[in-house]
Structure formats: C-alpha cells, structure tokens
Amino acid sequence: MKNKNSMKYSGIGGQAVLEGVMMKNKDQYAVAVRKPNGEIEVEVEHYVGVIHGSRLLKIPFVRGIFQFADSLILGMRSLNYSASFYEDDGEETAADKAFRKMFKDKADKALSAIAMIVSVALAVGIFMVLPYYITSLLEDYIRSDSFMAIIEGLIRIAIFVLYVLSISLMKDIRRLYRYHGAEHKCINCIERGRPLTVSNVMKSSKQHKRCGTSFLLFVMLVSIVLFFFIRVDNPVYRVLIRIALIPVIAGISYEIIRLAGRSGNLLVRIISAPGLLLQKLTTREPDEDMVEVAIAAVEAVFDWKAYLYEAFGYEVDDSWLED
C-alpha cells in the first residue's frame, strides 16, 4: 500500500455556489444544491471549453488564458443554476419583459453574458487601473520608477485583500465561504487517500493550493514583476499595457497554480503559503449538511473509490463508509 499521508493530484476542482457546490472532472461537471425543502438536487452536465480539442491547450502559458475564460463561464453558469432555486417569485418588471422580448429564449444566456462582461470590466478597473491611478498621484514625491512599480503592486494587493474582507462581512457571502470550505475539504480528503465520508471530510483541511483565491493572489504578484520590467512613458499607454498584459499574467499564474497542485517540494510550499493564508478569509468551516452537498457533487462526476485504488493502492471496504 502506498503512503496515505502523501498528497496525490486528483484532477477534480470546483467552486462554491448559492447553497451548494460545483465539482468538475475533465469534461463533466456537477452542481449540487441544498433546496429550500432540505433535499439535495444534483445536475450533471458536460462542458468542453471555448477551444475544446485545440493544440493551444497543450502550450504552457497560453492554455491558462483559455482555462481562465472557461472557469469564468462555468462559474457563472453554475451560480445561475443554484440561484434558480432561490429566485423571488415576484411580478416581472417592465425591464424584465423588454429584455425577454429582445432575446426571447436566450434571455438567460444573454443576461449571464452581460453580467460576466460587467464583472470582468469592474475587476479590471478596480484591480488594474485604480492602483495605477492612485500610484500616479505620488509621482511628484517619488522619482524612482522601480519603487513606484512596487508601490503600485502593494496597493493592488491591499485593494484585493480589503475587497475580500469587506464582502466577508455579508451574511450570504459568509455562508458561501462555508460551502467553499466544504469543497476544499472534499478534495483534500480524497487527495490525502481517505474514503469520502462526512467524518473524514470534516477532519480535512479547508485550504487547498489549487484554490481560485490563490490564483488571484498569484495574478497580483505576477503583475508586480511584469510591470516592474515592462514600462512606457505615456500615461495612456501605461493603462493600456496593464489591460493588454492581463492574458499574459493569467497564463503565468495558471502555470504556477498548476505546479502547486502537483508538487509538494519546499519551493512550491513557500510560494503557496501566501495564498493558503489568504484562504483563511475566503473559506470557513462548513457543517455536516454542507459537506453532504459537496460529497454529492463529487460522487456525481468522480469515482473516488477507483481513484484511491489507483493512487494509493487499496480498495475501500463499504463498512468504512458508515459514519
């Protein structure tokens, strides 16, 4: 039997949604939601990605750009599905009717696309453009371009952390963070070679190196390095180059997070530490009901018993599954 204390990459990942968890394995994903009546609803679908089958997905630093786009699309789709169980049944407004008349049966997809575009635009403005603007106010006092680049990066990280802290004060977000913890605990339980039971999951860590929180922090750190070396004098070009380099930053950050999920060497543990620390803000301890939802999402798309046999060399006795 292989060492069950070591961590083995499973390939599954996911995210928290409204009163539930989405789990993805290869081209299949499942969204499990705790409905208002207490039952768990699970939907399983296929998602092949924006450039499915393309050779670009095998090119390091390029594939991350499309993987990031896929995560945004799939994340929005999963959130919309979970929200459908908790929508207000109030009377449709005139704006809603006009929107549905314009897009007809594609109204929901159009609304999701608009919401995603607006969200991305706001994120770019807040986390890329705003730090540059704040830093530019210091140009009369600081003459070193290198020091300015570092200050801009630190401001970017500070804004990101303040954003995470501020939304964590919202009741709904705190509950979402608990499902986020349940998602991580399930993956950690499996990748540590433990049978996927409620008791085993509850004892697992709520932090994981492949988390989206860690990815976003890597984006902030990588941007500091790139903007330190890539400089232009024109203020307009400075803003444009920050926007233009976002795909490059995402591609580099993806490779770092990908490496972190597959390796446990000292260097990887060091670079993963800040992200794991930040996850203390974006994950909270779930209760057993939340863990049950997360397990349902995993089991809908992933044969964890076969994985444990292949990765850790032992078969799961069904008697072990009694909590």
Image (cartoon, rainbow, N blue to C red):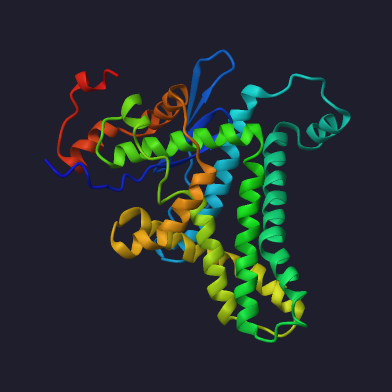
Question: Does residue 302 show up?
Answer: yes
In-front residue for pair 145/111: 145
* Residue drawn at 29 percent across, 33 percent down: 304
Where residue 196 sits, quadrant-wise, is top left
Q: Is residue 72 left or right of residue 129?
A: left
Asked if residue 256 is positioned above or below residue 99 in the image, the reply reads below
Question: Where residue 256 sits in the image (x, y, percent)?
Answer: 42, 62
Question: Where residue 41 sits in the image (x, y, percent)?
Answer: 50, 21
* Residue drawn at 82 percent across, 31 percent down: 96
Question: Where residue 86 sits in the image (x, y, percent)?
Answer: 65, 23
Where residue 136 sits, quadrant-wise, is bottom right
Where residue 87 sits, quadrant-wise, is top right
Asked if residue 319 is positioned above or below residue 150 in the image, the reply reads above
Direction left: furthest residue: 1
* Residue drawn at 60 percent across, 74 percent down: 150
* Residue drawn at 58 percent across, 45 percent down: 73
Asked if residue 64 is positioned above or below residue 27 in the image, the reply reads below
Asked if residue 288 is positioned above or below residue 243 in the image, the reply reads above
